[in-house]
Amino acid sequence: MKISVILGHPYDKSLNHAIASEAVDTLNENGHDVRFHDLYMEDFDPVIRDEELITDRSEDVLVRTHCSEIRDADGIIIIHPNWWGQPPAILKGWVDRVLREKVAYRFDENNDGSGLPIGLLKAKAAIVFNTSNTPGERENTVFGDPLEKIWRNCIFDFCGVRNYSRRMFRTIAGSTQEQREAWLREVRDTVDMCFPQNSY
């Protein structure tokens, strides 16, 4: 399987980077074709310009590479921290510029864009790994877990990926080495379960 792994975190010693490394290693061990992108390392430009918006085409070679790979992906893994109940700006810009019309979704010929989209992504499964310093009870009762709504409803369901799972690791501040190692084992188990050897 071709699996796209997208990381959005600026600090290379972060738990997010360790999660990405664990996910990539597990996928490689399971024999998958991994396309890994560290958006900060690549210096991905998150800003969509007017010409790109109105033409729905990008002259940015990196954006075009991402579009091609995500269109062709059999599976997707996204890794990022919870910042203000949202992905970091660089990852939000990746969504804006890569999960675009005619790549990730389309509308019927007579639809002006206000109706229901038709998802185009062929990925059979998607996983989102998040980190947070907000306790789970506060996240759910006060904020309503906005990241779950963003990824499940606003993005993957919109783009046609129905088999979706998400794991939030919390709270990162003050966590022990033992706790982080346990979280990384959970990452490996989750990836193994979703993208096993010889799957699909």
Image: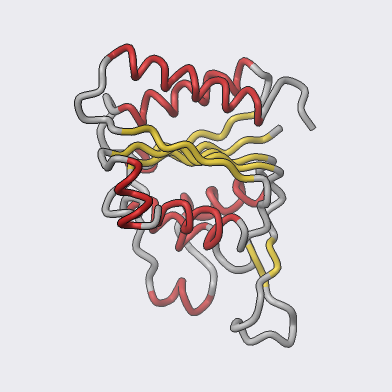
Residue at x-position 53% and y-position 54%: 64
User: How many numbered circles are shown?
Assistant: 0
> Which of the 4 image quarters holds residue 177?
top left
Location of residue 62 in the rendering, given as x and y in whole percent from the top left corner:
46, 50
176 to the left or right of 144: left
Q: Where's the C terminus, which quadrant?
A: top right
Q: Is residue 82 left or right of residue 70?
A: left
3 or 165: which is nearer to us? Answer: 165
Q: Where, quadrant-wise, is the N terminus in this rendering?
A: top right
* Residue 190, horizontal then vertical, whole percent: 57, 27
Rendered residue at 62%/58% (across/down): 157
Q: Residue 158 at what x, y percent from top left?
A: 61, 63
Give the residue drawn at x 60%, y 82%: 113
Where's residue 94, x and y in %?
43, 54
Rendered image quadrant of residue 129: top left
101 w.r.t. 28: above or below: below
Residue situated in front as seen by the camera: 86 or 105: 86
In front: 41, or 182? 182
Task: Determine whether, in the image, residue 161 is placed left or right of residue 181.
Answer: right
Q: Is residue 101 above or below residue 98?
A: below
Q: Residue furthest left?
A: 174
Q: Is residue 93 above or below residue 57?
A: above
Q: How is the image coloured?
A: secondary structure
Give above or below for 28 relative to 33: above
> Which residue occupies 48% across, 62% down?
59
Residues 33 and 198: in front is 198
